[in-house]
Amino acid sequence: MFDMKRKFKNISEKSIKGCKNILNYWKILSPTTKSFLILSFYIFMPIALHYIFLHFNSCFEYERKGNWKSNILCAIVKAFALTFPVFIFPKITKLYTLIIALFIYIPYYIDSCHIMLFKQVITKGALMAIFDTNTAEATGFIKQFARFDTVSLLILFITLIVLTLKYVKQMDRNKSFFILEKISFITLLYALIYLNVFSKDWNRYRFVTVSMIHQYRDLRFELVANNIKKRRADIKPFENINDKFKNKKTTFVIVIGESAGRRHFQLYGYNRNTNPLLSKRNDIYAFSKIESPHAQTLLSLQKVLSFAYGDNKELMFTKGSIINYLKDAGFKTFWISNQEPGGRHASYQSVIAEESDYKIFNKDISQEKKTDILYDLDLMDYFQKALADTAEKKVILLHLRGSHATYDKNYPKEFDILKGNSSYKEYSVNSYDNSIIYNDFVINSFIEELKKQNQISYLLYFSDHGEDAGDTVNSCFCHHDGIRTEPMLQIPLILWLSPEYKKSYDLKISKKDLEKSYNTENLIHTIIKLSGLSNPDYEKAKSLL
């Protein structure tokens, strides 16, 4: 015990002595040298921390590649190299500090948080989600992931920016200035030539900012609405479409849910009463082994709504979508959405939605209803108008808000049924399950309204992807392709057929069909089949039925 106290005392004394020596050495340094070291440390910190987060948090071996000490050395080289502009233009030192904040601190903060949250660097899918997100989704994401580590890092970065702006000074052209200028220039050459030309692992050494720019450049054609439209400009109409319901009045409804995980549906064996209405129906089919192609909306729906599958993404642009197919088959198409339309950085499904004969999004609905709070059942008025349309053949696509984070914002107060908030997990699971209960009410209401039409009709409901809502150890209560778990891909798929439909179309659905493993990247073939349509583009083997 005495030896431990003595060792601790010795370590403390050495630490204090070391700090005093550093302070004494700092005092005798010239103002130019001080500014150089302050600026270098300022640039070094976000780069070094990013390397550390990547090395110890990434779930991918190739991202953890390299000794963390060599990565820190690389961060020092980058920091010295990036000080070179202030030697050329000494008067812009404080402005350059702000430029570094914009082009280094912000990208490195975003990427570091992505590593901490999702165990990998920013991916194309994540960038697509960022560009396509809306205010409500962004607010929900921030609330959900405002953790101690991400907030602490933000405070640290802001503090470093403020302190550097306060203490860094313009460098005087003296002897130390020219020595430091040479050091900076040599490290700049090393960074430019060796790391970018001779290094076999350039991706590991390049700046996060550069990586993001490359990612964005690669995604331009997928992100920019005008480019999507241009790439789809030469799409040929679908031809030779056969219709089993020719000359018959038909109304088909496709409901796209959001973040609804199959594991939280009572219909699939969940131990909570989350489907109080649908579970009582004997006229629906609940398919039990359905998965989404991705754990993110954009990546998933661009396959679900098109003929694209697997790595054959070009089919999104070389062949028409489900909307194009149905229109070419003579249907009037309606797109009613409780989500925001895309802007300049529109997603594929936003462009497809715009091609519908009639479309309305939550922004327009909010203005008409004069409210900022919309729930999925608020789409009912527009659904009823679509049902009342005189077109002989109609397809109505409803895009719900569903169970997207923040969960408790997705349902009105009367559906706040499951309570208890003794922990974050308990509150989150209860809120998520409440959103599933409300979703049950919404789907059942749409079925009942459609049933009143006494027409040949079906309602097909599925979710864009699932959600890990407390279903795994260390659940993130989220969905993301980078860290996807089984619950993020396991989705519900529910089908209702009207009595008139069953009389007109002898579609047999067996128990084997209900238990068939199926991925919704091929769902366009199932929709074609359900709609009684067929042509050479339809592949029977890819249909669920």
Image (cartoon, rainbow, N blue to C red):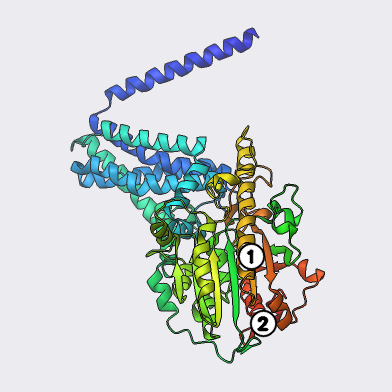
Residue 41: image quadrant is: top left
The residue depicted at 72 percent of the width and 47 percent of the height is 272
Q: Position of residue 417 (x, y in %)?
A: 63, 43
The residue depicted at 57 percent of the width and 70 percent of the height is 303
The residue depicted at 23 percent of the width and 34 percent of the height is 169
Numbered disc 1: secondary structure = helix
Amino acid under label 2? Glu
Residue nearer the viewer, 207 or 378: 378
Quick check: 344 above or below 62?
below
Quick check: 398 above or below 265?
below
Determine which residue is flagged by label 2.
Answer: 539
Q: Is residue 242 left or right of residue 369?
A: right
Q: Position of residue 137 (x, y in %)?
A: 47, 52
Q: Distance of mark 2 from mark 1, alpha carbons?
A: 32 Å
Amino acid under label 1? Glu
Q: Can residue 320 be seen in the rendering of this structure?
A: no
Q: Is residue 387 left or right of residue 28?
A: right
Determine which residue is flagged by label 1.
Answer: 448
Quadrant housing the C terminus: bottom right
How packed is label 1: few (under 14 Cα within 10 Å), some, or many (20 or more)?
Answer: few
Tell me which numbered mark, 2 or 1, is placed earlier along the sequence: 1
Q: Residue furthest bottom?
A: 240
Q: Position of residue 54 (x, y in %)?
A: 53, 46
Q: Can residue 277 be seen in the rendering of this structure?
A: yes
